[in-house]
Every structure is written in C-alpha cells, then in structure tokens.
Amino acid sequence: MKRETLPSWLSLLLTTQFFLPCKNHPLSSRSECNLFCIECEAPPDAFCYHCHLDHHSNHHVIQIRRSSYHDVIKVSELENIFDISDVQTYVINSAKVVFLNERPQMRTCGPLSSSSYNCETCGRALLNEFRFCSLGCNLTGIEKDMKTPSDVANGSEYKRIEDVASGNSSDSNTRSEKEIYNENNEEEPPAKRVARHRRKGIPQRAPFF
Ligand SMILES: *[C@@H]1O[C@H](CO)[C@@H](O)[C@H](O)[C@H]1NC(C)=O
Ligand SMILES: *[C@@H]1O[C@H](CO)[C@@H](O)[C@H](O)[C@H]1NC(C)=O
Ligand SMILES: *[C@@H]1O[C@H](CO)[C@@H](O)[C@H](O)[C@H]1NC(C)=O
Ligand SMILES: [Zn+2]
Ligand SMILES: [Zn+2]
Ligand SMILES: [Zn+2]
C-alpha cells in the first residue's frame, strides 16, 4: 500500500496571510490576495486574480474563501490532492468547506459545548464524528502521532527511575505525559543522584585491636 505523504506546501498554506490587497494591482478590482499556487517551487505569498493571469495561468491554483473572518477552503479543491477525511467539514453558502486553522474558542456557557466529538488537538467541539477542527489541527495532530509512542515509552521510563531514586513512585505516568509535549525529551537520566547515597558501610576502625 502506498504511504500517503502530505505535500510540502501544506504548512506554508496554513501560515500564509490571505485577503490582503495586492501590491501589484492596488487599483484594480478583484485585487484581494485569496489565491495560492501549489505548483510553484517557491510559492509566492497569496496573490490576486490578476497575478494569477499574469504568472500562474497554467498552474494549479487554489482559492481561499472567508467565513466570518476565518479562512476556509472548498473541500472540492482539496479532496483530490490529499485526504481530508479527518477534518470537520461545514456547509457555507451551499459549499462544503474546511477551515484552514484553529479558531479562537469562546467560552460558551450554553448547551452548544456539550458535544461528543472534540478536536484532538485544540479540544473544540465538533459537529460530527471527525478528529480535527481544521487542517492546522490535523497537521499538528500528525506531528504528535509520530512523536508519542517512543517518547512516552522513554519518558516514563526515565520518570520511573527518577521517582524511585527519590524514594517515591506515585503519579509518574500522568506527569510524564504532560511534560513530554513541552520539553523535547531532554531530561537526563538521574543516575548521578543515586550514587551519592551509598552507605558508608562498616565504619572504619583501626585494623588491630
Ligand atoms: C490528518 O491526520 C491523520 C492522522 O494523524 C493523517 O493520517 C492525515 O494525513 C492527516 N491529514 C491532513 C490533511 O493533514
Ligand atoms: C529511547 O531513546 C533512545 C535514544 O534516546 C532510543 O535509542 C531508544 O530507541 C528509545 N526507546 C524507545 C522505547 O523508544
Ligand atoms: C510518596 O508519596 C505519597 C503521596 O504522594 C506519600 O504518601 C508517601 O509518603 C511518599 N513516600 C515517600 C517514600 O516519600
Ligand atoms: Zn495581483
Ligand atoms: Zn504558480
Ligand atoms: Zn482544533
């Protein structure tokens, strides 16, 4: 089976600022930069309709749309490029879209927040059974997936040794899991600590008496 690899431009797409006015076409209409070329080797920033005609006319270009000030992209523009089946889709103006990035979450006190599905990365309540709220959270989720198994094994191993060394082995697992995401697993094995505690042994006495 073919292993699916995500295109290298995906993270660039997610960090690009869209909908700024085009510097090359300040006086034209349709000059907001809402297009992105997935073919150019070093893709320029977002560009406008006129830039598209001038420089990317035969390229595969995708269009970013806006919904309440958030960038979205039509599912139909992405689904043939890579698998977005883990990402929550929304229907906006009768088009199915996904959000590019995580959106700031309001503290809702209403009943809306009681969802059975939550984004695995940011915790946002989802409407249906998806794993991520946005492409950005999906990408973050992959990075975690790749890190987790070995780091947790290693991390908790170190923790256990450390806790034993300091004479207590409770709550090692919950702690280690949290810390692993923050630190880059750079804890050093606490071997030095243990060595100092060796008992002095039998007090030395004069060999003869
Ligand atoms: C979403 O995440 C899954 C699992 O982590 C991964 O296999 C898939 O390629 C990701 N898709 C995108 C579009 O990031
Ligand atoms: C733990 O980390 C070491 C290197 O730091 C690595 O060689 C080893 O494979 C890791 N162990 C596990 C279980 O991932
Ligand atoms: C270990 O921690 C528990 C509580 O977390 C405590 O009750 C116990 O006395 C501790 N043992 C040692 C040897 O420090
Ligand atoms: Zn332009
Ligand atoms: Zn191009
Ligand atoms: Zn999310």
Image: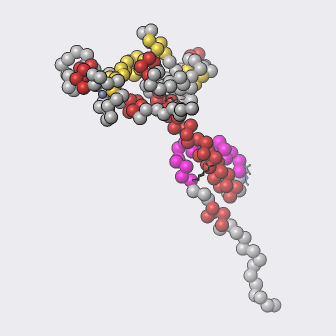
Q: Does the magenta segment cover residue 177? A: yes
The answer, for residue 127, to whether it is visible in the render is yes
Quadrant in which the N terminus is drawn: top right
Image position of 188 with respect to 41: above or below: below
Residue 186 in the image: state x and y as whole percent. 54, 52
The residue at the point 34 percent across, 29 percent down is 39
Q: Residue furthest bottom?
A: 208
176 and 80: which is toward the camera = 80
Indicate the position of residue 57 as horizontal and vertical percent values. 27, 22
Q: Is residue 16 magenta?
A: no
Q: How is the image coloured?
A: secondary structure
Q: Residue at x 65, y 51 (%)?
A: 157
Q: Quadrant of the C terminus?
A: bottom right
Q: Is residue 143 above or below residue 128?
A: below
Nearer-the-camera pick, 64 or 189? 64
Q: Residue at x 33, y 34 (%)?
A: 41
Extreme residue in the right direction: 209
User: Residue 165 placed where, x, y %?
Assistant: 68, 58
Residue 153 lies, in percent from the top left, at 64, 46
For residue 101, above or below residue 151: above
Residue 208 placement, left or right of 4: right
- The span shown in magenta is 169-187
Q: Residue furthest left?
A: 27
- In depth, the one of 9 and 153 nearer the eye is 9
Q: How many marks?
A: 0
